[in-house]
Image: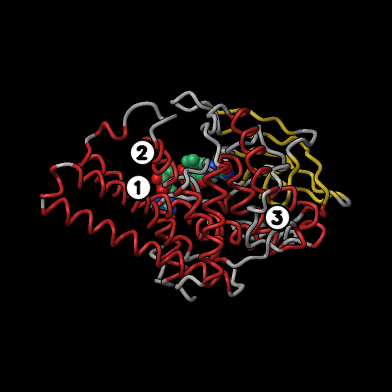
Amino acid sequence: MDLTWSPEELAFREALRTWLAANVPAERRPHDPAAGAAFDRAWQRVLFDAGWAGLNWPREYGGRGLSILQQVIWYEEYVRAGGPPMGFRFVAQNHAGPTLIALGTDDQKAGHLQRILSGEALWCQGFSEPNAGSDLASLRTRGVVDGDELVVTGQKTWTTGADQTDFQELLVRTDPESSRHKGLTWVICPMASKGIEIQPIRKMNGRAEFCSVFYDEVRIPLSNVVGQVNGGWATAMATLGFERGTSFIGEMAEITLRLEELIEIAKASGDWKDDEVRRKLADRRAEVAALRALNYANLSRYARGEPPGAEGSITKLLTNDVARSVHELATEIAGADILDGDLERNRWGDLLQHGMVMTIGGGTPEIQREIIADRVLELPRSR
Ligand SMILES: Cc1cc2nc3c(=O)[nH]c(=O)nc-3n(C[C@H](O)[C@H](O)[C@H](O)COP(=O)(O)OP(=O)(O)OC[C@H]3O[C@@H](n4cnc5c(N)ncnc54)[C@H](O)[C@@H]3O)c2cc1C
């Protein structure tokens, strides 16, 4: 990948910066789930109408067919302009859409991609179950093939936005004789289907973005299966590859910006004279540079047409670690007050909280390390 910006890319950045300066909404995304979902749909529609959605998605499905590097410029400028967080747009934009582009049928792409880009359709992810989180391959929600339908019965949990979204990436066990990774199927589940009951889970901060989802003989057309019946593990690995590998570019841009802000805070205070503080800031800057290089390596693989693989776990692990170390240094330099106060207004506090939960969402650090040892480094198994 050529990392120097071409005149076209510089012009693209300039046009984007000008548009964002004029159009980023002044109000914050509401935390109430229903109001947040309405905000997400409206904002995505604005982006789509202005031609700033699906930059590297295929043109025939509503995207712009631009380069992955232009998508990176988009994230950098979006974060710099203080664009709204992804909210319930995250699953559809960052991994359901890319999974359909990589593995969906033409009908699935035609039926869903433009609706995702225009904000008409929000998606959620139905992977985790009460006894299958880290050990996803032990999931037990059943899918029985009946004619041209899949009949689903079981339970998912921790489904972010289940009660506010339209479709779900649903992973079920279709071969009852199978165990572990075999006999699973990845299917597009319409959330308005008969037989689905959704129970929001209230968190200790009072918000309820998570849900438990119960399926009682929910009938889903077999044409909604992405990949093969009983071959869903491969589709799920592609989804998780996108979720862990390429969807952290926005986080990277945010951390980069926050660190530069922290350097300015340190410069304005007496701390700048302290060698130790400057050394720590330099260390963090080196970590952010390493994270950027890793993201670019992933992106260049993706640009060559290779779907993100297990190496996405390295990106997820490093993103979580760098975010935590930047936040820790922020409290050291600016005091705990930087993280305190009204989360609606305080970006640092919001990011700290988000950074903490994101170490678990998409898979915990222990599991990422196992994947890196097993599938990237191919180390011998300890058991
Ligand atoms: C913000 C957020 C959003 C989420 N959104 C969704 C969503 O939309 N859809 C969805 O399907 N899921 C979602 N999840 C669920 C998430 O994927 C799981 O929480 C995660 O995979 C961990 O599973 P678990 O909670 O069952 O923990 P467990 O698997 O029970 O793990 C508990 C602890 O044991 C450790 N552990 C487990 N197995 C091992 C092992 N083999 N070796 C070493 N340590 C181990 C873990 O690292 C962890 O510390 C979300 C979670 C969060 C926090």
Amino acid type indicated by mark 1: Arg
Q: Give the mark nearest the N terminus, 3 or 2.
A: 3
Residue type pointed to by label 3: Thr
CB atoms of marks 1 and 2 within 8 Å = yes
Residue picked out by circle 2: 348
The part of the image, by quadrant, that contains residue 374 is bottom left
Q: Is residue 291 left or right of residue 92?
A: left
Q: Which residue is drawn at 14% across and 45% down?
A: 271
Q: What element carries label 1?
A: helix
Q: Distance between the residues labelled 1 and 3?
A: 41 Å
Q: Do the residues labelled 1 and 3 touch (CB within 8 Å)?
A: no
Q: What element carries label 3?
A: strand
Whether residue 142 sits left or right of residue 77 in the image: it is: right
Give the alpha-carbon distance from disc 3 to disc 2, as whole Å: 40 Å
Q: Which residue is drawn at 48% across and 45% down?
A: 361
- Disc 2 is placed on an element classified as helix
Q: In the rendered image, which residue does mark 3 sit on? A: 185
Q: Which residue is drawn at 28% across and 62% down?
A: 286
Disc on the earlier residue, 1 or 3: 3
Disc 2 crowd rating (10 Å Cα; few below 14, some 14-19, many 20+) is some
In the image, what residue occupies the spot 59% across and 72% down? Answer: 306
Height in image: 193 above or below 311? above
Q: Residue 3: x, y in percent?
A: 45, 72
Q: Residues within 10 Å of mark 3 (few under 14, many from 20)?
A: many
Question: Image quadrant for the C terminus?
Answer: bottom left
Q: How many labels does the image show?
A: 3
Nearest to N terminus: mark 1 or mark 2: 1
User: In terms of depth relative to the viewer, which is nearer, 5 or 271?
Assistant: 5
114 to the left or right of 320: right
**Where is mark 1, residue-wise?**
258
Residue 14 appears in the rendering? yes
**Spatial CA span between label 1 and label 2:** 8 Å
